[in-house]
Image (cartoon, rainbow, N blue to C red):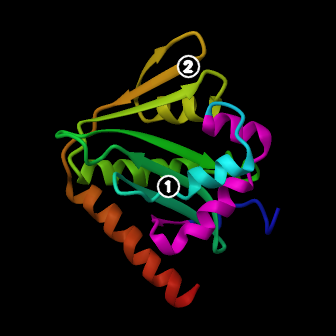
Amino acid sequence: MTGERTLHDPVVRRLRFGDQNDICEHFLQFDNQTRRARFCGAVSNKGVLSYAQNVLRYDGIACGAFVCGQLRGLAELRGLFHSWPATTEPAFSVEAEWQSIGIGDALFEQMFAMVQNRGVGTIQMMRLKKNGHMRHLAVKHNARLVVDADVVEAILYPNWPTPVSIAVEIFAETSRCSYLAFG
């Protein structure tokens, strides 16, 4: 692991096409357990890279958590532009060495502001039952859980945009500018 395993005020911001290499590197850092939890099964490096190339496609957005300039966590939103009010399924990933220190929480807060600001009506998260980190995150944010044999579905209904949700997203964008200028 590079650097200390402390939060160091991560920069959480929307990812752009210029972040594509960071996204690929992030997914390749996963150990087997993290990869299995994120992709709900075994995936080869080739499969991971193919997936990573499509993270920033037309029907979704993503935000990343950078610690000391390195992408350590990522939240993706898919299906934002298919219907109104939109339903989206976020996907989260935090490198194993950087879990349990608040990166997932920071990503969740940013993701929630982003969906709220886009008028999303429903957030649906599907996770393996064994993925305790995601289950904890869903419960912490008052998601309704539906448990199946191997899968847990977490459902949230965001409110309309608020001054706070707009400020959260604007702050993340200005943090990007500050980081690029001074980081």
Residue 28 place in picture, x, y as percent: 72, 55
Depth check, front residue: 31 or 68: 31
Identified at 60% across, 55% down, the residue is 73
How many tags in the picture? 2
Q: Which amino acid lies under the numbered mark 2 shown in the image of this protein?
A: Val
Q: Which amino acid lies under the numbered mark 1 shown in the image of this protein?
A: Asn
On whether residue 23 falls in the magenta region, the answer is yes
Q: Is residue 9 above or below residue 123?
A: below
Q: Which residue is mark 2?
A: 151
Which residue range is magenta in the image?
A: 11-39
Q: Is residue 99 above or below residue 144?
A: below
Identified at 74% across, 55% down, the residue is 29
In the rendered view, does 80 fall on the left or right side of 129? left
Q: Residues within 10 Å of mark 2 (few under 14, many from 20)?
A: some
Depth check, front residue: 73 or 161: 73
Q: Residues within 10 Å of mark 1 (few under 14, many from 20)?
A: few
On whether residue 5 falls in the magenta region, the answer is no
Residue 45 place in picture, x, y as percent: 73, 50
Which mark, residue 54?
A: 1
Element assignment for label 2: strand
Q: Quadrant of the C terminus?
A: bottom right
